Image (spheres, grey):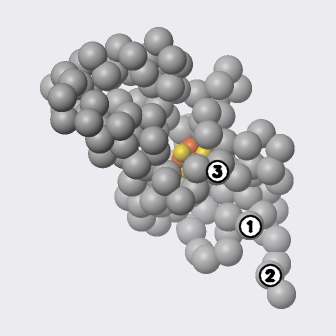
Amino acid sequence: MSTVIHHFSDLDRTGTWLKYRNGLCDSCMATCCTMPVEVKLRDLVRMGVVDAFEAEAEEPKQIAKRLSKARIVEQFNFKHGIFTLARRANGDCLYLDAETRRCTIYEQRPDTCRNHPRIGPRPGFCAYRTK
Ligand code: SF4
């Protein structure tokens, strides 16, 4: 049986974050999915928003332009080839289901999401918030 901890992290103050442990996500409202997500071209290919041919043939800048028009990407760092995924007005990631608070592309999600919270603003801690 899992116990639900009542905790209200402040996303902007990592000092209030909780030490991550297995099962924590089950009772969390997915606060981590409201942070800006930086992705690489290979993530966008896995997510199915850029096809492999386009990734080879097209300039990343052109791809960024298209994805920004489609409101999938909100920023592109040309120097590092890093795209920032767009968010909804309330801060939610585009791919977060507003009702279930679950990722709708979980199997294809970007590396940044896979690595969180091992790699992140405060490694090993997350902005846990009960549903
Ligand atoms: S892609 Fe999925 S796991 Fe990553 S921030 Fe968006 S909803 Fe969360």
* Residue drawn where x is 74% and y is 67% of the image: 26
Does any portion of residue 74 appear in the rendered image? yes
Does any portion of residue 78 appear in the rendered image? no
Mark 2 = which residue?
2
* Residue drawn where x is 83% and y is 87% of the image: 1
Query: Residue 60 shows which numbered tag?
Result: none
Mark 3 = which residue?
103
Mark 2 residue's CB less than 8 Å from ligand 1? no
Mark 1 = which residue?
26
Q: Amino acid at mark 2?
A: Ser
* Residue drawn where x is 56% and y is 68% of the image: 19
Mark 3 residue's CB less than 8 Å from ligand 1? yes
Secondary element at image label 3: loop
Residue 92 location, quadrant:
top right
Q: Amino acid at mark 3?
A: Cys
Secondary element at image label 2: loop
Seen in the picture, residue 7 relative to 19 is either above or below; the reply is above
**Separation of marks 1 and 3 at Cα, in angstroms:** 13 Å
Total residue callouts: 3
Seen in the picture, residue 60 relative to 116 is either above or below; the reply is above
